Amino acid sequence: MGADGDVKTPVNEGKPLIDKGALDDAGEDERRKLKMIQLLFGTGHVMNDLCAASWFSYMLVFFERVACLSSAAAGGLVLLGQVVDAIATPMVGLGNDISASKADHSIPGDRVRKRLPWHLFGCALVALSYPCLFIEDAQYTYGSSNAAVVMWYAVFVTIFQTGWATTQISHLALIPDLSVGKASRKTSLNATRYAATVLSTVAVYCVAWGLLGAASDDMGSNSGDNSTSSDGSSNLSRSNHTQFNILAVFITCTGIIFSLLLFQVGMRYVVKNYGHLLADPESPTSSATAKAKDATSMWLHNKKFYYVGAMYMCTRLLVNMTQTYLALYLLESLDMPKTSIASTPLVLYASSLMGTLVIGKIVKTVGHNASYAIAVSGCLVAAGMMYIIPKSATWMVYPTAGLFGISSSLLMVSCLTIVAKLIGDLPGSAFVYGAFSFTDKLSSGLVIMVIQTIDLGVSDARFYRLVVGVMPGFVAAIALVFLILCAREPNPDSWDQYMESRSPPQTPTNKGGYGTINEVGGDNDLDQDEDDSPTTIDVMDNTKLEDHFLEAE
């Protein structure tokens, strides 16, 4: 309690709140704690990252080559997953923001605590459903009708994507709460998150490489196995079902360790013991207590919200499409052995991991927008190289994958930082991430379905070369257009300014204005000569003027 009876933010056992800007000047002990929070945050999306690596890289080729579904059925299942994800993300975002708005803001870190159950629920759904996509059961894989197999996959794709979306949005929504308004903290959290993504993806490809390589050795030693080609390499078939089963079990168990155990337990410990590091005492209290529906309305009426959302959609589409069709490009267009669908993505993401080491310096030196433009240019060059690589020089795939990996890491971190900068300290962060993910998932699903069903009258080798080499360039050009539009548009006003702008024009503006809107002829007359504004001040006596500013405070 303060002297005037107001409730003050409690101090946890002698641990003072950090003043504005003090996070950057924190002592060694506090820096160590902040680094621990940053690393813990990176573990929260590991399960999703592991699943996403195999989903985009292997799910389509698994459905076609291992589960022996038609191209249309495989594309339909991927589209179903993306649509479910797209629908779930804004709903989860809104619910997440409602939970956060009910936090007790006298307790530092309570907003983080309110978001953690959503993350826990999402991870549980993913852990329960993802292995079922790869269950080896003769009844479903070999004996049942095609419709029954598709239905089996459809049920678990729906559960999995619902959990994936819940985990993703809950994790992204923590960034504004953990960064306490510091741009450098947002960049660090995004870089840590992407580094965890790259490490998780590299782990998936290493395990897949080992499993598929061992399977190739076994098949090569069997002279009667007709799945082995004349050059000793082997392609994917139903006989590789076991390798994908093992991969799914590895992904699930590793994800449980990091996202369900380490992250959940660690973040609760952080909130309980280091909550004072997650409070910004000078952030507007109205932002903390704003209703989710008001925040949603604010974002929907902001032009830059749509520009950044379109740029985010193009960014994710560029990365997702390359990752999804890279395996089929390697197998069909370049006729490489099946181990290449693990070794090539491994090079790509190892390069991404190296890129994360210098991303912070690049962004700090040239800025977020310039970093994004540089990254898009790198992706364009890599896509052009993939289009021209001949079968006789398949070694060129690896340096090309390295270039794309470095460019995509800079692309994603720059894009996520632009999104975080758009949000700032404004409410509705989960809604923003959910809305952006909606466009990302829906566009990816629709594009995959179109690619799976379209017939250009060319060979498969030519077709997948076009998909991997030409489509990313087209998407990258669109992304650059929206980047320019974003750079020209200012960030949203503060929450207080937005709420003031919603005040009825008939009501006197006693929150920092200089009179009433009606005195100057309503909203449409606010653009009259600047000399008109001081006239209202002149007719106000000192008492009214003093009361005016006191109420504004």
Image: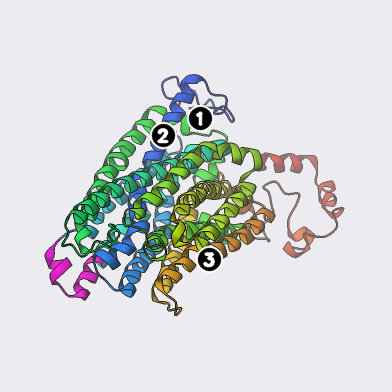
Query: Mark 1 sits on what residue?
Result: 5
- Judging depth in this view, the residue of 504 and 78 nearest the camera is 78
Q: How is the image coloured?
A: rainbow
- Please, what is the three-letter code of the amino acid marked with disc 1? Gly
Magenta span contains residue 532: no
Identified at 38% across, 27% down, the residue is 273
Q: Nearer the viewer, mark 1 or mark 2?
A: 2
Query: Mark 2 sits on what residue?
Result: 39
Query: Mark 3 sits on what residue?
Result: 470
Tell me, yes or no, if residue 182 can be seen here. no
Q: Residues within 10 Å of mark 1 (few under 14, many from 20)?
A: few
SS for dot 2: helix
- Judging depth in this view, the residue of 512 and 20 nearest the camera is 20
Identified at 56% across, 65% down, the residue is 474
Magenta span contains residue 149: yes
Residue 227 location in percent, x, y? 23, 63
- Please, what is the three-letter code of the amino acid marked with disc 3? Val
Q: CA distance from mark 3 to mark 1?
A: 66 Å
Q: Which residues are magenta?
A: 137-153
Quadrant showing the C terminus:
top right
- Please, what is the three-letter code of the amino acid marked with disc 2? Leu
Q: Residues within 10 Å of mark 2 (few under 14, many from 20)?
A: some
Q: CA distance from mark 2 to mark 3?
A: 37 Å
